[in-house]
Image (cartoon, rainbow, N blue to C red):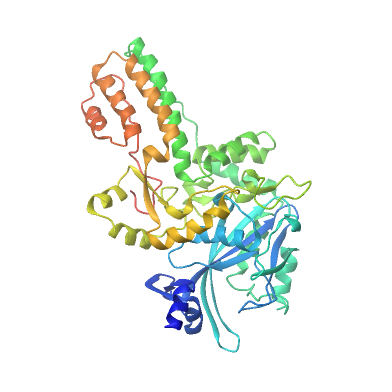
């Protein structure tokens, strides 16, 4: 009985198969490492861009694996039912007292670690989601708050020096094979910070040269004066909807857009970045199978003033708003760390009408556990993150009318104003119906009005195309 009670209190992991998929089983941490079961964890690296240094933590002497050795900035297991990104954020907070929003975390790759330590008693078969947090400068060491059971010290070290120490198998450092898959971390940093503006400019210019500007003119002579005024409002409404599209491509896309535009006159390279971004509306090139032409090193700088405990004379943590190296197949319609299997399991747990909504055009999928709480409230949110993830399915639906409420409210007002102007009864019905649909998420009446439209002026506006959703096409 006592053993069963201890297992119940002990952290449980999802048991995976050899390809990293969930088996549907969960086991206590001690049994997972005793039996060598495959499971998941996160590695979070903090990288200081201006000094080209990685933050390392010294593992506490009481750890059951690699005690007292220098290791990753922050790392931890993904508990049963938890998500990767939420775990990455929580581990960084718990171990180092650093609270960062989700846009600070750049997913790099998955690393499978298979090793046996402690005289064969600790078997670690672990799929690690590797994340990078890019800050401008090193975080002052006095800003950290250690979890004593996990961390005894931290230090910054040149990534090149760290790589050399690993290659030499220095006994003071947790070993990683820098000639194997984990070399990706160092390859990424090396490639990302090469000083070669001329070569990058040449490459982006070649990509731009594949496009030819074309001027399109609209014939407006047959429109009445009031319909021309209505058209002006429809164009403004379309520009508001464009903002939603930027968000649907990637959560921090508008921030990147504004950053690139503001800096577009600084150099020829900055101008080319902005021009090619404007065509693609993302950091990925559509004509090159969505290969990224920008990296997080090109991204916007954000200030987090309360991400750590305060340090006199330090204004706070400046970081790059991260974006993934590969365009997420689900864009921003789903959580970035959700896969098809998780979605299908959740969908199959829903009632029939809920399944239709989950696969429809009028909702986005979010996590209960991924509410983007601020630095001041993250500590109080940690308990709710734990309990929510384990008590109910983590995925949930959020109607467009709620997800994009500020934008849709503005677009709705513009459509109502345009509907009030037009002298076409069928166009008036369409515009007012669409304006109401933006707020109610019920598009049936406005869709019927569009099919029955009899007007020189037509408009298609709303959640009708899903080209960015390469995961399901919903």
Query: In the shown orientation, is residue 169 left or right of residue 390?
Result: right
- Residue appearing at x 60%, y 89% in the figure: 119
Q: Nearer the viewer, residue 289 or 438?
A: 438
State whether residue 327 is above or below residue 386: above
- Residue 180: percent from the left, percent from the top? 60, 73
State whether residue 415 is above or below residue 355: above
Query: In the shown orientation, is residue 103 left or right of residue 411?
Result: right
- Residue 434: percent from the left, percent from the top? 31, 29
For the view shown, which residue lies furthest in the front direction?
A: 1
- Residue 305: percent from the left, percent from the top? 67, 45
- Residue appearing at x 31%, y 20% in the figure: 457
| Residue 209 in view | no
Q: How many marks?
A: 0
For the view shown, which residue lies furthest in the bottom direction?
A: 119
For the view shown, which residue lies furthest in the top direction?
A: 225
User: Quadrant of the rendered structure where residue 444 is?
Assistant: top left
Query: In the shown orientation, is residue 406 left or right of residue 121?
Result: left
| Residue 414 in view | yes
- Residue appearing at x 26%, y 19% in the figure: 455
- Residue 46: percent from the left, percent from the top? 66, 59
State whether residue 470 is above or below residue 421: below
- Residue appearing at x 63%, y 46% in the figure: 298
The quarter of the rendered structure image containing the N terminus is: bottom left
Q: Nearer the viewer, residue 238 or 219?
A: 238
Query: In the shown orientation, is residue 326 left or right of residue 153?
Result: left
């Amino acid at each position: 009985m006592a053993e069963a009670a201890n297992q119940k209190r002990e952290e449980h992991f999802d048991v995976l198969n050899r390809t990293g998929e969930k088996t549907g089983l969960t086991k206590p941490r001690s049994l997972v490492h005793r039996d060598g079961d495959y499971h998941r964890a996160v590695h979070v690296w903090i990288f200081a861009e201006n000094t080209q240094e990685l933050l390392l933590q010294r593992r506490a002497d009481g750890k059951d694996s690699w005690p007292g050795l220098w290791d990753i900035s922050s790392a931890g297991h993904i508990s049963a039912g938890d998500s990767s990104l939420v775990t990455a954020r929580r581990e960084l907070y718990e171990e180092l007292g650093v609270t960062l929003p989700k846009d600070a975390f750049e997913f790099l790759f998955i690393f499978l670690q298979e090793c046996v330590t402690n005289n064969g008693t600790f078997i670690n078969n672990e799929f690690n989601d590797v994340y990078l947090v890019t800050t401008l400068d090193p975080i002052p060491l006095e800003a950290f708050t250690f979890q004593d059971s996990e961390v005894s010290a931290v230090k910054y070290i040149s990534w090149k020096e760290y790589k050399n120490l690993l290659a030499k198998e220095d006994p003071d450092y947790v070993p990683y094979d820098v000639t194997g898959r984990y070399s990706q971390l160092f390859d990424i940093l090396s490639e990302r910070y090469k000083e070669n503006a001329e070569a990058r400019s040449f490459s982006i210019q070649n990509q731009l040269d594949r496009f030819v500007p074309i001027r399109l003119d609209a014939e407006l002579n047959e429109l009445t004066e009031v319909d021309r005024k209505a058209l002006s409002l429809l164009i403004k409404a379309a520009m508001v909807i464009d903002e939603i599209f930027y968000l649907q491509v990637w959560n921090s896309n508008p921030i990147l857009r504004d950053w690139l535009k503001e800096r577009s006159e600084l150099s020829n390279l900055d101008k080319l970045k902005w021009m090619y971004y404007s065509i693609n509306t993302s950091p990925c090139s559509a004509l090159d199978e969505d290969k990224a032409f920008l990296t997080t090193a090109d991204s916007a700088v954000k200030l987090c003033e309360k991400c750590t405990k305060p340090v006199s004379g330090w204004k706070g943590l400046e970081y790059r708003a991260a974006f993934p190296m590969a365009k997420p197949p689900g864009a921003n319609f789903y959580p970035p760390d959700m896969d098809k299997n998780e979605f299908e399991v959740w969908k199959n747990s829903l009632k029939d009408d809920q399944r239709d909504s989950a696969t429809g055009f009028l909702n986005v999928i979010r996590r209960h556990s991924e509410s983007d709480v601020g630095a001041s409230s993250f500590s109080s949110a940690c308990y709710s993150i734990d309990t929510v993830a384990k008590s109910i399915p983590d995925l949930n639906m959020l109607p467009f009318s709620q997800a994009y409420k500020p934008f849709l409210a503005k677009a709705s007002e513009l459509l109502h104003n345009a509907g009030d102007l037009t002298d076409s009864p069928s166009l008036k019905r369409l515009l007012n119906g669409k304006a109401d649909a933006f707020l109610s998420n019920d598009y049936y009446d406005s869709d019927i009005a569009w099919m029955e439209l009899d007007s020189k002026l037509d408009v298609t506006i709303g959640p009708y195309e899903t080209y960015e959703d390469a995961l399901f096409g919903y």
